[in-house]
Amino acid sequence: MPAENSPTASQPLGLLASIWKSGLVRFLPFVFIYVLGVAVLFPIVPTIQTNGFASAAIGHVIDCQEFTPETAPQECVEAHAQAVTWGSWTSFVSGSILSFLCSPVVGHLSDHWGRRPFMLVGIGIAIGPMVVIMFNLWGWLSIFWYYPFQALNGIVSSFSMVLTCVADVMEPRHRAAAAAFVLAMFSIGLIIGPIVGGIISPDQAVYVCISLTVCAALYVLLFVPETAPRKCRAIDRVLSMRAGSIFNASGNGAEARTRYQKVASDGASSSGQHNSEGKVDDAVEESGTPTSASDTSTDVGRMTMLASLTNGWRILASSSWYMKLALIWALFSAMSSGAQDTLLQYLQLTLGFTTHDQAELLVVMASCSLAVKVTVLGLLIRFLGDQWVVVFGLVAYVIEFLLLAAAHTKATSIAAVAVGAFAAVAWPAFIALQSSRANADDWGAVAGMLQAVGSLASGTGPLLFAAIFSRTSVGGPGSANFHPELVWYLGSILGGIAAILTACIYVGENAPVPIVSRRGNGDGDHASGQSSSPVAAVAGGAGNSLRNDDKPDPHDPWVLNRTVDLQSSLERLRSFKTHAMHKTNEDRGNQHRDAGSEARPLLPGQPHK
C-alpha cells in the first residue's frame, strides 16, 4: 500500500488514540488520586468551620448540627456568616492577590522550566490546610489558622497546570474533549471522595486525605512526563550533545549519536512533547551551538517578575479578542467561586444540612456532572462549537441559581444542583476556546494571564456574595431581614451578562472557521488544513470549501459550521446515490448476461457452465 493511501498518512488520529499516544493518559490517574484525597474533606470542612466559629463565640465546644434552623442559638446562626466572610477574604487573598501576581510568572516560567516542578509545588502547598484541620481536631490549633494556609493555594494550582498540559500535547481539535476526560477524572474523584468522607470519622478522613496527597506527589515524580515545548526541546538537545560527546570519545560517535537521537525523538513524540515546528530559542546561541539546560535555567532565572507579568499582559493588550475573553472569564470566575464559597453554608443555615446531607449533595453534583461530560459534551461540541457550548453552560448556571433561590426543601435544593450539572460543559469548552489563538510556545503565558484574570475575579466574587449573605442572614429564619436567597439572584445576573458577552465575542472579529480544502479528484478526500475548533475537525471531511481562497470569513462561526455540516450531508447523499446507481446498473448487466446464457442452446460437445 502506498504511503499516501495508508490510514496513518491520510487520516488524523482519533481522540482516544491521541490521548494515548500524546501521553495525556498518564495524567488521568494523578488527577483522580489528587482530587480523591482532597474531596474526602469536602463534606467535613464546612461543619468544622461552623462549629469552630460558634464554639469560639460561646466559649465552649458546640455542635451546631444538633439544632434545627429554627432552634439554633444565635452563635450558630452568626457562625455561618462568619465562615462565609472568612472564606471570601481567603479567596480574595488567594485569587486577587497571590494568584493574580503569581499565575503569569508561574505560567511563563513553566514554559521554560517545565510543568512538573510547579505541579509538585502545588501539591506541597495543598497539604498545609489538611495539616491544620488535623491539628484543629486534636485541639492544638484554632480554626482561624486554616484560612491563611488555604490562601497560599493561590500561588500555584496543580490542577490548572494539568489543563495547561492538555494544551501542550493535544491538537486543537481534540483539546475540549481531552479536557473533558481530565474533568471526568476530577468528577470521579469528587463522587468517591465525599462518600468516603461521609462514612468515616473526621480524624480518619484527614489521615486518608494526607496519605492520598502524598501518593499523588510520588506519582508525579515517577510517571508524569514533561510537556512544556521549550523544556522538551532543550532536554532533547542536551541529551543529544551528551550522547555525542560520550560516543565520540569511544570512537563510534556518528552512528551511536544518530541512534541515540532517534530514541530520544521517538520518546518525545510518544508523550506528545515533540514539536516539529519549534524554533531554536533560548538554548541556542548566535553561533548556532546549543547551550546546556543549566545555562538556559540560569538565563530564565535572571528574568524579573515584571518581565514575566508583562509577557502575558502584552498578549492580552495586543488582542481585542483576548480582552473580551478575559472579561467573560472574570465574570464566570466571580460567579462560580462566589457560589462555591456560599452554597454549603447557605444550605446549613436555611435547610439544616448536616455532614451526611452535604456528602449526598456533593455526590449528586459530581455524578450528574460526570454524566453530562460523558454523554452530552461531545454532541454539544460537535453541533454547537466551543463558543456556544460556553453559552449553554452559563445559561445552565443561571437556571441553577434561580432554582436554589426558590428551593425550600433538601430534595428541591439537590434537584437544583442536579440541573446545574449541565454547566459542567462550560469549563472544557472555555479551555479549548481560550487556546484557539495562542502560539504553542506562548500558551503557558496566555494560560497564566487568563488564570490571573480569573483569580482576581475569584477573589472579588466571594466578597460580593459574602457581603450580601451577611446582611441578609441577620436574625435567622423568621426575621424580617432574613433573605439570604438574594445571593443567587446576584449569581444569575453575573451569569446572564457572561452568556451575552460570549454570544457576541466574535462581533467585529475575524472568527476562526472550519477551513476545508478543495476537492481534488472528487473521491471524498479529507480536509488537509487544520482548524482550531473541534467542530472544524468534525466537519473537515465534508470535501467542499466554503470559499475558494480558503480564508476565514468574518461571520458567525455557528452558522458557518452548520453550513459545513449541511454540505457534508449533501455530499454523502450524492456519493451514496452514485454508488447505488452504479451497483444497480451492474446488477442489471449481470441479469441480462445470465438470461442470455440460459436462453442460448448448447452446441454439440459444449460443456455445461
Image (cartoon, rainbow, N blue to C red):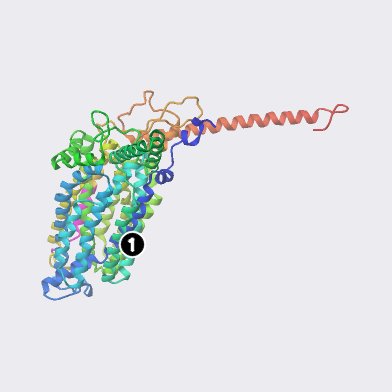
Prevailing secondary structure of the magenta residues: helix
Can see residue 590?
yes
Q: Residue at x 26, y 69 (%)?
A: 354
Residue 489 visible at all = no
Q: In which quarter of the image is residue 107?
A: top left
Picture quadrant of residue 269: top left
Q: Does the magenta stretch include residue 109?
A: no
77 in relation to 505, above or below = below
Where, quadrant-wise, is the N terminus in this rendering? top right
Q: What residue type is labelled 1?
A: Val
Can you give x and y, in whole percent of width and height, for residue 109 in the image? 22, 43
Task: State which quarter of the image contains the C terminus.
Answer: top right
Frontmost residue, 369 versus 403: 369
Residue 483 covered by magenta stretch: yes
In the image, 199 versus 460, the foreground residue is 199
Residue 237 position, x and y percent, is 31, 37
Magenta residues, as a range? 481-495
Residue occupying the point 22% across, 49% down: 333
Give the quarter of the image for residue 279.
top left
Residue at (33, 35) in percent of width and height: 557
* Residue closer to the observer: 592 or 451: 451
Asked if residue 4 lies left or right of residue 113, the reply is right
Instruction: Kindly give the residue lying farthest to the top in the view shown.
Output: 549
Rendered residue at 20%/42% (across/down) = 449
Secondary structure type for disc 1: helix
**Where's residue 426, x and y in %?**
30, 47
Q: Name the residue under label 1.
A: 363
Q: Relative to residue 198, is residue 384 depicted above or below?
A: above
Image location (x, y in percent) of residue 501? 24, 41
